Image: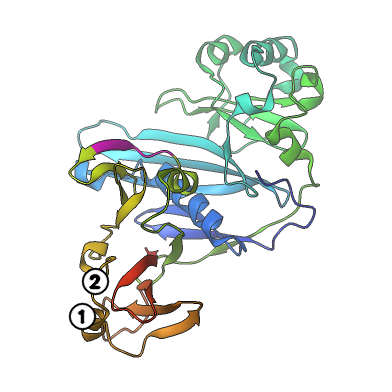
Amino acid sequence: MAAPSEKPENIKVIRCPIEGFFLPQISGMADHRREGKINRELRGMISYYNRPEQYGSLSGDFEVTFYNGNLLGLHFIGASYNRRSAHPDKIDFGIQIDLTTGVRYELSDLFKEGVDYEGRIKELCRINEAGYRLTNKDVCNWTWDGWSYTEFARLWEGDRFLLSADSIRVYDSLNYATGYFSGYRVPLADLTDIINTDGRMWKALKSREPMNVDVVLEPLDIGDFFLREYDIKPGDDASWATNIMGEPKSKTPVQEGMRYEYDDLEIIVGPQGKVVNIIADKKDVSTRRWVHPGSLIKTVKARYGNEAVVSSYGEYDFYEYIFYRDIDNLRPKYILRFAVKKGTDTVSYIGWRISEP
């Protein structure tokens, strides 16, 4: 597990307009795999509410609420529309991401295990009503100031919070007509006895002083892609695959062994616990139509060309082919990499980088 860095990377947050809402994406991290993981999770968390297949749509935007080089806090506010609903559903949630690990923190991660932190926060808000309470002037003018502490205590749950260097904001939303609670700002100093000061979230929060981060408006369309890279190949242990990809969404018996299903790809694991195939059906590209171990190299060259060797190492030649979706617009979309053992006609290694919108 990576430790908070004393020298944070020079990242920026991309504000991408997508079909009526703005999507946050991270750019500039040296670890492209971790950057890709973070960006996939951000896309998943927000795009979940955009459901055109159910005749729904999403509008909304986000702001950066905290950044110190190691920890990034985002606040997304929007509305999800469905043609069968009288009013849109309000979408409002905070995202606190550890940039050194890619972990998204929940409020429970801040506190000692087994502590009733929700009860403690509610009680502090009750006895410090005047000092903690926020109004729409403190937050923004679309919040509603007519709520009572009783309503807050009944409705608030610990997943509705925003983090800052010295406090947390706890809030909730009522129905469409009334708007949002402005909520309370609870100083961390009043919670010190229940904070887990040995926990990853606290260490990430206190690793550096808050700093500014550039938020740049950049369109994201079919011509703009983010790099994904998988360091998995046939012959690897299944434990190595799950170490890189995490636990699969499902495991299904197939003729070759077990199929591990992920959002981006499937991994076929043989009876000996070894990866025997990797399948990536993304957009119009699939590894089933690419190169597999056992393919004749003369067949591969006939299909993809002879001039693709990018390097040689030991007993392997490494090949790379760039694919284009539109031949009139030669921007690379998919990059296939594989290695061929020298002196044979057999592809003995398969690996690839997939660029995706």
Q: In this view, does 152 lie to the left or right of 247?
A: right
Q: What residue type is labelled 1?
A: Thr
- Residue 123 drawn at (x, y percent): 68, 9
Question: Element under label 2?
Answer: loop
Residue at 25% in and 42% down: 257
Badge 1, how many Cα within 10 Å: few under 14, some, many 20+? few
Spatial CA span between label 2 and label 1: 7 Å
Residue nearest the observer in this picture, 216 or 99: 99
- Residue 328 drawn at (x, y percent): 27, 86
Question: Element under label 1?
Answer: helix
Mark number displayed over residue 64 = none
Q: What residue type is labelled 2?
A: Ser
Q: Is residue 113 left or right of residue 189?
A: left
Residue bearing the label numbered 2: 295
Asked whether residue 103 is in view, the answer is: yes
Q: In which quarter of the image is residue 159?
A: top right
Q: Does the magenta segment cover residue 167?
A: no
Q: Is residue 203 left or right of residue 240?
A: right
Query: Residue farthest to the left?
Result: 255
- Residue 106 drawn at (x, y percent): 58, 30
Asked if the residue under mark 1 is in contact with the one under mark 2, i.e. CB atoms within 8 Å, the reply is: yes
Q: Quadrant of the N terminus?
A: top right
Residue at 55% in and 54% down: 34
Image height check: is 168 above or below 150?
A: below
Q: Quadrant of residue 98?
A: top right
Query: Residue farthest to the front?
Result: 343
- Residue 65 drawn at (x, y percent): 64, 44
Question: Which range of residues does the magenta coloring cover?
Answer: 247-252
Mark number displayed over residue 299 = 1
Residue at 51% in and 35% down: 93
